[in-house]
Image: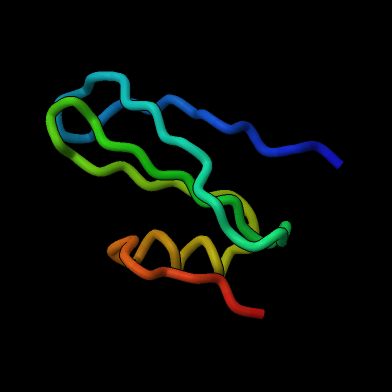
């Protein structure tokens, strides 16, 4: 099984600069791999791969205290 990338790069929606997002620590579960980073302009960028419902839940959250439950 392939391991998820630890760092991904996206274009900031606010200022169009490159922003790096880092793999967040979660349970040892393959349902979701959440990423988060902060652009130099202060904009928070979240991204996730995996189970559709878990990804939607993560992206809809404010990132604070979000947890994936089985």
Between 65 and 46, the residue placed more toward the observer is: 65
Residue 12 position by quadrant: top left
Q: Residue at x 87, y 42 (%)?
A: 1
Left or right, 15 with respect to 24, comes to left
Residue 14 position by quadrant: top left
The picture places residue 48, in percent across and down from the top left corner, at 51, 50
Left or right, 43 with respect to 56, comes to left
The picture places residue 2, in percent across and down from the top left corner, at 80, 37
The picture places residue 29, in percent across and down from the top left corner, at 71, 61
Q: Residue at x 34, y 38 (%)?
A: 37
**As displayed, is residue 22 above or below residue 26?**
above
**Residue extending furthest toward the top:** 17
Between 56 and 3, the residue placed more toward the observer is: 3
**Residue extending furthest toward the right:** 1
**As displayed, is residue 55 above or below residue 35?**
below
Q: Residue at x 44, y 46 (%)?
A: 47
- Tell how many labels: 0
Left or right, 20 with respect to 24, comes to left
**As displayed, is residue 49 above or below residue 63?**
above
**As displayed, is residue 12 above or below residue 29?**
above
Q: Quadrant of the C terminus?
A: bottom right
């Amino acid at each position: 099984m392939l391991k998820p990338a630890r760092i991904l790069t996206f274009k900031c929606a606010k200022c169009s600069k490159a922003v790096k997002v880092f793999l967040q620590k979660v349970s040892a579960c393959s349902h979701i791999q959440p990423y988060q980073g902060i652009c130099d302009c202060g904009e928070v960028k979240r991204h996730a791969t995996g189970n559709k419902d878990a990804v939607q839940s993560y992206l809809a959250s404010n990132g604070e205290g979000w947890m994936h439950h089985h």
